[in-house]
Image (tube, rainbow, N blue to C red):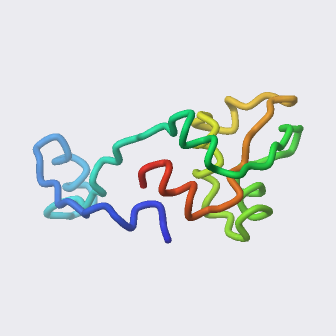
């Protein structure tokens, strides 16, 4: 299950993208529909079984996703669940909660 599986692909031919289309010799540009971000409520978080990981130097979201889910492309689940848009926002010593059930985590995140 990929991050954008449930989202439509939109063809964008707006004037804003005219220079980009011209430089790439395209009639339109395909975009994914904008994701509506949902942060889990406290009651949703309580229902999910998680493991705590203390962030240390050298950690990466994709490494945690591989460790917990066997799939590095689910790095965004770890980042989104913890409210960190990028790894640059996480400091050594920060405690991250890793949802153990990937299917439930994706459902709680609203994707």
Q: Tell me the residue at 76%/55% (across/down).
A: 64
Q: Look at the picture and state if 12 lies above or below 37.
A: below
Closer to us: 88 or 108? 108
User: Residue 4: x percent and y percent?
Assistant: 40, 62
Closer to us: 30 or 83? 83
Closer to us: 72 or 98? 98
Closer to us: 49 or 60? 49
Q: Is residue 100 left or right of residue 44?
A: right
Q: Look at the picture and state if 56 lies above or below 64.
A: above
Q: Tell me the residue at 60%/41% (across/down).
A: 45
User: Residue 82: x percent and y percent?
Assistant: 64, 37
Q: Look at the picture and state if 68 lies above or below 82.
A: below
Q: Is residue 109 left or right of residue 94?
A: left
Which quadrant holds residue 83? top right
How many marks do you count on the picture? 0
The C terminus appears in which quarter of the rendering? bottom left
Q: Is residue 48 left or right of residue 107?
A: right
Q: Tell me the residue at 11%/47% (across/down).
A: 14
Q: Tell me the residue at 71%/58% (across/down).
A: 100
Q: Is residue 87 left or right of residue 63?
A: left
User: Residue 50: x percent and y percent?
Assistant: 73, 49
């Amino acid at each position: 299950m990929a991050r954008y599986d449930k989202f439509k692909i939109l063809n964008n031919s707006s004037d804003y993208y005219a220079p980009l289309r011209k430089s790439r010799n395209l009639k339109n540009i395909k975009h994914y529909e904008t994701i509506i971000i949902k942060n889990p409520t406290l009651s949703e978080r309580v229902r999910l079984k998680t493991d705590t990981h203390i962030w240390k130097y050298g950690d990466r979201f994709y490494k945690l996703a591989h460790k917990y889910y066997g799939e590095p492309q689910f790095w965004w689940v770890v980042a989104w669940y913890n409210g960190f848009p990028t790894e640059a926002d996480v400091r050594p010593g920060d405690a991250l909660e890793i949802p153990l059930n990937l299917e439930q985590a994706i459902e709680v995140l609203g994707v």
